[in-house]
Amino acid sequence: MMNLQAKPVITVFEHSPDEGKGMARDMRVRWALEEVGQRYDVRPVSFASMKEAAHRSHQPFGQIPTYEDGDLILFESGAIVLHIANHHTGLLPQDADARARATSWVFAALSTIEPPIVEREVVEYCEREESWFEQRMSSVDDRLRNRLKDLSHRLGEADWLDGAFSVGDLMTIDVLRRLAGSGLLEEFANLLTYVARGEARPAFKRAFNAQLACFNAASTDCNQSPIANHKESMK
Ligand code: GTB
């Protein structure tokens, strides 16, 4: 099932606005690739080139990330991560029902948890000067708190959402990371620990360091998968 010869190529921001904090959606793709031990190359794209026809032929909305493996071109981080999980061992359980449940968590992360987080970011960055900013932020935070409360309740004292670490945890943790600095995650001790548990995984660290190297520039590391140097910690 594993094919470590072919190297997929993913697109990433040439200059990430998060300044290397790994908040853009290439991070979840990098993390998935690192978890399964698949080497990859990155193609940094500028904001201008993302909107050009060549990139749009891979990503109709002019966004990152994309994924290219031979003739297969994918967009949407969820589809990419699920493709990686389905074609390698390590991110999905063997049992068919457990695989389906892990997939449910990917969709929950993307369509139930991430939208109110993104909404909060939009309000914070785009509506700060509006007279109604405080009121709107407070109602967005309350909606988000409800989601976090339900997630926190479901996770309980467990390490991961449904047994062993899976693609569902990867996606959920990557989505929750976007709350860093908001103070909201701190209201749910088990979610804070959950995110830290994900970030402590060797694969996460390699992915994080790779995107940081990419941000740090003109660094020649940008187009290199770090897996080659860290095979010993691959599981
Ligand atoms: N649904 C798509 C997916 O999951 O792949 C969404 C892709 C997407 O939103 N891509 C963003 C993008 O290309 C980058 S990740 N934006 C450019 C554009 O739309 O023109 C979103 C993002 C960007 C920056 C930060 N940051 O700096 O903290 C965090 C998240």
Image: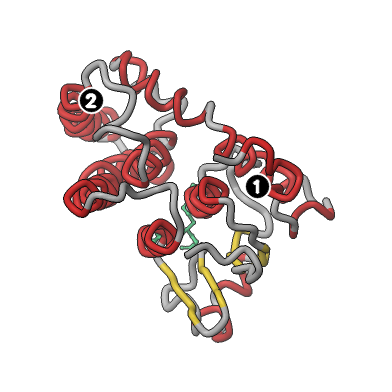
Residue at (40% x, 56% y) in the render: 85
Q: Quadrant of residue 198?
A: top left
Question: Within 10 angstroms of label 2, few (less than 14), some, or many (20 or more) residues?
Answer: some
Label 2: element kind:
helix
Instruction: Point out residue 197 in the picture as x, y percentages from the top left corner.
Output: 45, 24
* Residue 115 visible in the current orientation: no
Q: Is residue 43 left or right of residue 54?
A: right
Q: Please give the label number shown on residue 233.
A: none
Residue at (43% x, 34% y) in the render: 177
Question: Within 10 angstroms of label 1, few (less than 14), some, or many (20 or more) residues?
Answer: many
Residue at (20% x, 50% y) in the render: 104
Amino acid type, mark 1: Gln
Number of dots carrying numbers: 2
Instruction: Point out residue 57 in the picture as x, y percentages from the top left corner.
Output: 49, 84
Instruction: Point out residue 140 in the picture as x, y percentages from the top left corner.
Output: 22, 35
Q: CA distance from mark 1 to mark 2?
A: 29 Å
Q: How is the image coloured?
A: secondary structure
Please determine whether, in this image, residue 78 is positioned above or below residue 54: above
Q: Nearer the viewer, mark 1 or mark 2?
A: 2
* Residue 213 visible in the current orientation: yes
Q: Give the mark nearer the N terminus: 1 vs 2.
A: 2
Amino acid type, mark 2: Leu
Instruction: Name the image quarter holding the C terminus.
Output: top right
Instruction: Point out residue 79 in the picture as x, y percentages from the top left corner.
Output: 36, 64
Q: Quadrant of residue 45?
A: bottom right
Q: Is residue 177 left or right of residue 34?
A: left
Which residue is labeled 2 in the image? 155
Q: Is residue 209 left or right of residue 146?
A: right
Q: Quadrant of residue 182?
A: top left
Mark 1 C-beta closer than 8 Å to ligand 1 = no
Label 1: element kind:
helix
Which residue is labeled 1 in the image? 211
